[in-house]
Image (cartoon, rainbow, N blue to C red):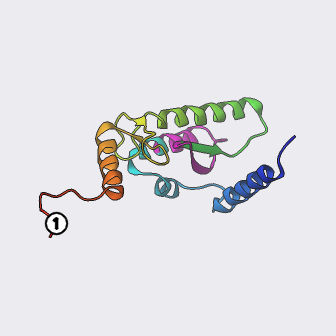
Amino acid sequence: MSCPQINCKRKEKEAKRKENIKEKNMNIEEAKAQVKSGWHKLIDKAFAITDILPFAKIEYITLKYSMLQIHFESTLDKAQQYVLDSISYKIERESARVCQECGASGNRRKDITNTPCLCTICYTLQYNEMMESVSPQVTNQEPQ
């Protein structure tokens, strides 16, 4: 038995997702604008596939569970669809191991909201920024 509230939330999420799709086939500049610079090589890789395979057209790109998801236009041929799904899956899994800030080898970090994939250096910088924003400033000066 399903809860009506959950179904409503799912429908709302799906409607928002559809609203966020500006064009049916996005170009490389739009795709790169949606992600941070560390993942630009992954975007280039996805668009290189569209140059090689004539049936591969990128509809849109999303972030889900802090991983890059490439959504290709569906095809009627099952073999072609399998190839596109496999490419999308490979890029998604690769994005879980690449720092989205600088492109170095990284891990998904659960200490920061939205669990971004970051290398150690970028993680340290973001974690320090987060901690400074929630904790009081420590200084060597005595209160007056």
Which residue is at the far left? Answer: 141
- At horizontal 74% and vertical 40% (from top left) the residue drawn is 75
Q: Position of residue 115 (x, y in %)?
A: 47, 43
- At horizontal 70% and vertical 58% (from top left) the residue drawn is 18
Residue 56, located in which quarter of the rendered image? top right
Which residues, given as a range, are shown in magenta?
A: 44-67
Q: Position of residue 35 (x, y in %)?
A: 47, 52
Q: Position of residue 93 (x, y in %)?
A: 52, 32
Quadrant (top left/top right/bottom left/bottom right) for the N terminus: top right
Q: Is residue 135 magenta?
A: no
Residue 77, placed above or below residue 125: above
Closer-to-camera residue (63/11): 11
Closer-to-camera residue (67/48): 67
Residue 71, placed above or below residue 85: below
Q: Is residue 61 magenta?
A: yes
Closer-to-camera residue (58/1): 1
Q: Which residue is mark 1?
A: 143
Asked if residue 123 lies left or right of residue 19, the reply is: left
- At horizontal 24% and vertical 59% (from top left) the residue drawn is 137
**What amino acid type should be assigned to the residue bearing mark 1?**
Pro
